[in-house]
Image (cartoon, grey):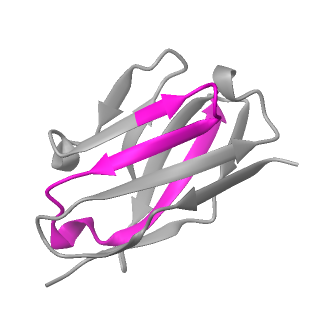
Amino acid sequence: QVQLVESGGGLVQPGGSLRLSCAVSGIIFSIYDMGWYRQAPGKQRELVALISTIGSAVYVDSVKGRFTISRDNAKNTIDLQMNELKPDDTAVYYCHAFILGKYEYWGQGTQVTVSS
């Protein structure tokens, strides 16, 4: 079975930092592109960041310069380092593994709340 398990969410003040992690099992991790999505209350799910099999990363404009996505193919994990957090970053964050047009898998999500 395929499992994607997120961790690291929590409550943080504006300007603070969090690191999310996603542990993946049941797939050949190194051949999957990976991404982080988020969904805030009353809003659609949006792509936050993705990272290719060779480590190339892209980000939604609202997090550029603040968030960093990374992967460790030896540990079958991806991380999302989130700095300078804003209230608008509050959302459930989801881990995503995919081979475009062929396969995709999702984690259950982890809550991030940015509030003073």
Across and down, in percent, residue 109 comes to: 55, 65
Across and down, in percent, residue 112 comes to: 37, 71
Residue 9 seen in the current view: yes
In the foreground, 85 or 44 = 85
Q: What's the magenta bit mostly, secondary-structure-wise?
A: strand
Residue appearing at x 64%, y 57% in the figure = 5
Across and down, in percent, residue 41 comes to: 37, 79
Residue range of the region highlighted in magenta in the rendering: 70-99
Q: Is residue 87 left or right of residue 49?
A: left
Q: Quadrant of residue 55?
A: top left
In the image, farthest residue toward the front: 75
Q: Is residue 61 left or right of residue 28?
A: left
Residue appearing at x 21%, y 47% in the figure = 63
In the image, farthest residue toward the right: 1
* 68 relative to 113, above or below: above
In the foreground, 77 or 92 = 77
In the foreground, 12 or 96 = 12
Residue appearing at x 18%, y 40% in the figure = 64
Q: Is residue 7 left or right of residue 23?
A: left
Residue appearing at x 39%, y 46% in the figure = 80
* 52 relative to 15, above or below: above
* 84 relative to 40, above or below: above
Answer whether residue 81 is magenta in the image. yes
Answer whether residue 87 is magenta in the image. yes
* Numbered label tally: 0
The C terminus, quarter of image? bottom left
Q: Quadrant of residue 33?
A: top right
Across and down, in percent, residue 12 comes to: 25, 74
In the image, farthest residue toward the bottom: 116
* 27 relative to 5, above or below: above
Residue 45 seen in the current view: no
